[in-house]
Image (spheres, helix red, strand yellow):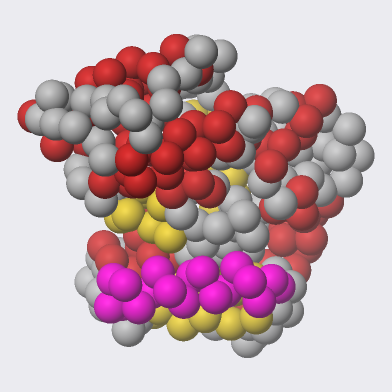
Amino acid sequence: MRQDPVRTQLTIAQALEQASRRLRDQMQPRLEAEVLLAHVLGKARSHLHAWPESLLDADQYRRFDRLVDQRVQGQPVAYLTGRREFWSLDLEVTAATLIPRPETELLVEQTLALVPAGARSVIADLGTGSGAIALALAHERPGWQLIASDRSADCLAVAAANRSRFALPNLLLVRGDWCEPLADDSLDALVSNPPYIPCQDPHLRQGDVAREPRAALSAGDDGLDAIRTLVATAPRVLKPGAWILLEHGLDQGEAVRNLMKDGAFTEISTIRDLAGLERVTRARAAL
């Protein structure tokens, strides 16, 4: 039986231990408990380690207890806190947006490596969601012009809040479907983490993914519908020799390379992530 926080004050250490037991079915129960409690207290996780004997008041415990309950019921931690770190940026996220993941940072790394740092380049992040990729690029390259597009007004509102938070005037937000709002021959690079999970994949019903917006995750029977659209429409908006970089599933690299080959792209290659899995395929528009 759980202790009544009104009658029994718990220390930070005790509250974390109790929550970790309740979150034991999660992959990182202690970490998740710390993230939730730090959010309630408005402190960094380091505060929990420095002051483990500090007492929680009744309101703090109730709020923490409620968040742990919601996590046990399957709500993602990022949605409970409204925050997720990406590229060392503390981003706002909501249930309208995909939760940014570490493997997507490979798109940022590759774009920074391929596009000259000193150039006045124009880069588009299509299907931007929370704005994570575009924000990271705009932050790293203030001389670049970033365009972040999404067809969801709710996603663009989150991206706009993040842009304001980090004061990035070189990031333009536009509403539209993939390449549709972009001008001909306007881009030096196009990047995207589109939906790529097959619509019947059982992973869509598991873990955090089950609570994320389906339109940001799944695209057709084989998961490649959005990628097909991007590969087919990108040549119109890319300058000659410009780059396209797309994230995809670990077993989709060959299919994406073939789509790019059929689309007359050149210098096609697939980059593996830190786990050794094919994650990003890149190519150049014909000269």
Residue positioned 52% across, 80% down in the render: 173
Q: Residue at x 27, y 28 (%)?
A: 9
Magenta stretch contains residue 156: yes
67 sits left or right of 155 in the view: left
Please state the horizontal and vertical placement of residue 30, each as a whole percent of the image. Answer: 36, 20
Asked if residue 279 shows in the view, the reply is no
Residue 184 is drawn in which quadrant? bottom right
Q: Residue at x 49, y 39 (%)?
A: 67
- Above or below — where is 101 with respect to 3? below
Point 77% across, 54% down: residue: 215
| Residue in front for this viewpoint, 201 or 272 | 201
- Residue 263 lies in quadrant: bottom right
Residue lying at the far front in this picture: please name it: 7
Q: Position of residue 279 (x, y in %)?
A: 56, 35
- The reply, left or right, for residue 182 in relation to residue 27 is right
Q: Position of residue 132 (x, y in %)?
A: 45, 58
* Residue 240 placement, left or right of 210: left
Which residues make up the magenta segment?
151-168
Task: Give the dominant element type of the magenta stretch: helix, strand or loop.
Answer: helix
Q: Nearer the viewer, residue 3 or 180?
A: 3
Residue 218: percent from the left, percent from the top? 78, 45
